[in-house]
Amino acid sequence: MKIITKMKLQLTAMLILTIVMSLLIGLTPVINKKKISEHFYDYIKNDRINNLVIKDAKGAIIYDGGFSKDELTRESTFHVVGDLNGSLPSSLLSTYLSNDANISLLDGYHSEQHTINLTIDLDMQKAAYKLLKSSGVNGTLFVADYNTGEVKTMVSTPSVDVKSKKKAADKAYLNKAAQAYTPGSVFKAIAVGALLEKSQSYQSLTFNCTGKYEEVSCSSAHGTVTLEEALYKSCNCGIAKFVSEHLTPEELNSFAKKAGVKSTDLMVDYPVKAGEVDANDSIRWSSDGQSKDLVTPVTIASYYGAIANNGRRQTFYYQKSNAKTSAKRIMEFRTSLFLKNALTKGMTNWYSTRFNCSCFGKTGTAETGRGTDHAWFVCSLTDTKAPTYVVVLMLEDGGSSTNAIKMTARFVNNTILGG
Amino acid sequence: MLFNLIQDVLLLLFLISAFQVVSQRHRDVYGFVVRKEEKVVLDGSQGLTTMIGRLRINDIHINKPDVPRKAAALTFDQKGHTMEVETLSKGGRYENNDYIIGGQRFHFSLPVNNQFRLSGMMPVFFTIGFIGFKAYCMYQEFPLTSMFIIHGILIAYVLLSMILRSDHAPIIESIFAIFLTYYIEATLYPALTNSEALAGCLRDSLIGVGVYVGMALIFSNFMKLDVNKAIGKKSLHQYLRIMALAGIIGLIVLNIVLAKVKYGAYNWITIGGMTFQPSEIVKLVYLLALVVPQRQLFNDRTNLIYTFGMTSIVFAYAVLIKDSGLLMQLGCLFIISVWLQNTDLLLIAIIILSTMVGAKAILKLSSTAAYRFTNWMGEGNTIFQILTGSGSLATHNGYGYQSVHALVAAFSNGGLLGNSSFDTLKGVMAANSDLVMGLLAQRHGAIFLFIMLLMVMLLIYTTFNSLQQQNRFQQVMTALSIAGIIFAIILNMGGTFSIIPLTGVVLPGISKGISAAICYGGMFGIICASGVSSSYYKLINERKAGMTNE
């Protein structure tokens, strides 16, 4: 064979090799599309995690490509931030990572730093966590601005340290603020709201409480109570009587629904569990927040916030980018005014010395049916010198609400007002 | 994205125009048209040198026992317009354009190329446009005047090539310059995230481009020089072989004495602040030593001892430094040189077989090579699955880490047109050398990757033409150089995308590295040395018919 022919054969062989290689390079991503995509999405996940910065309302760093070195920050913010394993599906990291990354067929994926600014106040968050942890009782403390909808604190105990290899405590992965619990007497404001939304004339209703009405009982006889007194004195019999005589179960269910009991979207960026009111089962116990009633602390905050906000409910959010400006009216102004006055009287009569600012609120001791009670306390700050916050404390199996009042007062005085 | 799209369009325009020009010129011939009794036995496509003798390897082979194996080499003196006849063995004679041997008379005449040809300047214009635009794009990332200076060197190189070449169609030079624009980008890559590294990267890219272009110019012009006449009795290749042997021994000693282990290879030495691998230069020197134009590689005892002796030394060197990629490249050069420069089929078979057995033995000897090979194969995969990356994907946390990142970067992260970023390969070792196509494909897109593969095909196709414009010495050098370059491209790109195991071989003209610039710059220069003189080009293109050697 001539040498020039050999050379041309050599070049032809190299050309064929190059074509074969090109075909194989082209086929590799087609054949392994699934595996390459998996690696790509793993890469994107890691990249997004590494480029994510989470800041609190004041700009303090909560997460910066990795979890904080401060254990208290990690534990107190766990139920907001979540972890990288998706253990808390509604948490910030889980929803952030489940959102599709911006991938284009033409220019692929761009790695870029992403900052999420929260409305959460890290100092308040830490203080709330310490408060709950030191109480020896598990529960949740939820604080939001009823005027703007900004969530300032959302703490739940027990919590999880994402950097610890220790086994997490039971129910540590539950954000109790978004879970539904028997509300007890904090529900009475919803029941009274339902009455007044049907007719404002019910404001003048009276009832002589002997400590027992049908299957409902009070711890002691309240004597003759008006609707307002029945609410702030937490008269089970009175509320049960008024509601059962003037509302149908459907009407109570309907207003509870309007009040947000069955809503999951009371927070734009954190789904809450739908609560339950089954007035058909026992409208009397149901109106007192017992029976089958289940309500989340966020719902209670939302409703009491609406009372403070003259009947308009502001949707909550904890990421600044989700700010909503429009509030939804869920009750008439007159209804909210009546409830506000009634609940303020209760605070003034019994708890005013505990708080360093004017506020209205309600206690709740909810029977769980297991021989324990959930302790509730909710209050809305109405002092012009205080921020427009609604505070809900729920202590799971926490016994009497007295402890809840004490803890809430300490938090309001020392952290909200003192801070 | 828009910038990448414009770059792709310019590259495609270059490719289309270049393919057209090369295919038009594919019919051009530069060597002698040889007739025997008015019958054309050679049409001029054999190149500038015509070999005559009994062996089949000759351009004109006469199967008669009284004809020498290699009788003569006939070349047209392009300056003096005379026939140069180098008699290799007695038995034939030259008379007025005729060579008489074995009782047969062969008539030699110059070729005629009078068909219409496309302008060879179009690809050059697209190349210059591309380089200029690329400089502008790089300026967006690195707003330094140096960006225009460094790209200006490439534009000047292409323009100079166009002016100096007789056919004014410097396609290979253009491909080379386009490759080098990506060399600049790959070398500057670390500075994209670390501005403190910019000065060092800029220095490296300037030196690299300078070395690449410098080596290409030196080798290209050296090949064109009529050195044989100047150096007396011995021919150029004989001097080169002696120098090559000395060079190889020197480089190996240098490696053994000064080398430090870096990235798992025992072949990095640092001189004057510059780090390079002597093994890269050994490839080029070995190539020079393998060329025996107008003779056979093993035609006498001296050649036999020299070829085998030197081959043994370089192979032992590759084994010593445990560089399987180098070993494969040297093996490829050796096999091709044997194939081109011998006729004995048995001998060729023995050489190829022994090389294959040697390679297998090396795989057992080198644990790194064996590890790579085994993991690339994977377990229970079919051949097709192996060739499409199943092994690497199964070991993405181990062996396949680099390749899987490169695949993700090229085919997912960059999209079709590229995202001008490099994040997938950030922190991955050898991102701008061994995995450079993964890096560039993410920055410029999957389409760009296939444009570059077309560019490689164009390089091979254009070399077909180059061979016809060269004498025998240049032809063998070109055949070995293109083999060295293409084999390196296959090893690099195949390894990057898991078609073959990773070898650590860099991508010629693109991967970061000064030592590679010396080696592949020289090889590109050899391939580029294909232009006949302007007067000869004019002569064979303007004559309507007939022959002359006056």
Image (cartoon, coloured by chain):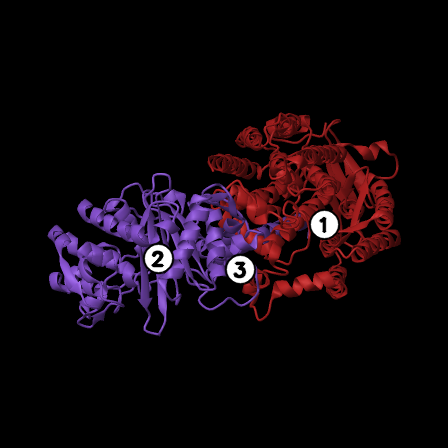
Chain colours: A purple, B red
Q: Residues within 10 Å of mark 3 (few under 14, many from 20)?
A: many
Q: Earlier in the sequence, mark 2 or mark 3?
A: 3
Q: CA distance from mark 3 to mark 1?
A: 86 Å
Q: Position of residue B140 (x, y in %)?
A: 55, 30
**Which residue was labeled with disc 3?**
A161
- Which quadrant would residue A364 be assigned to in this image? bottom left
Q: Is residue B326 left or right of residue A336?
A: right
Do labels 2 and 3 touch, CB within 8 Å?
no
Q: Which secondary structure lies at badge 3?
A: loop
Q: Callout 1, which amino acid?
A: His
Given residues B57 and B479, the one toward you in this image is B479
Q: What type is the residue that disc 2 sits on?
A: Phe
Callouts 3 and 1 on one subunit = no
Parent chain of label 2: A
> Which of pointers 2 and 3 indicates the residue nearer the eye?
2
Asked if badges 2 and 3 are on one and the same chain, I answer yes
Can residue A98 be seen here?
no
Please name the residue that numbered disc 1 is placed on: B61
Q: Locate residue A401, reporting x and y percent.
A: 36, 62
Of residue B342 and residue B409, the one placed in the foreground of this image is B409
- Residue B438 percent across, percent down from the top left: 58, 48
Q: What residue sits right under mark 2 in the picture?
A: A377
- SS at badge 1: strand
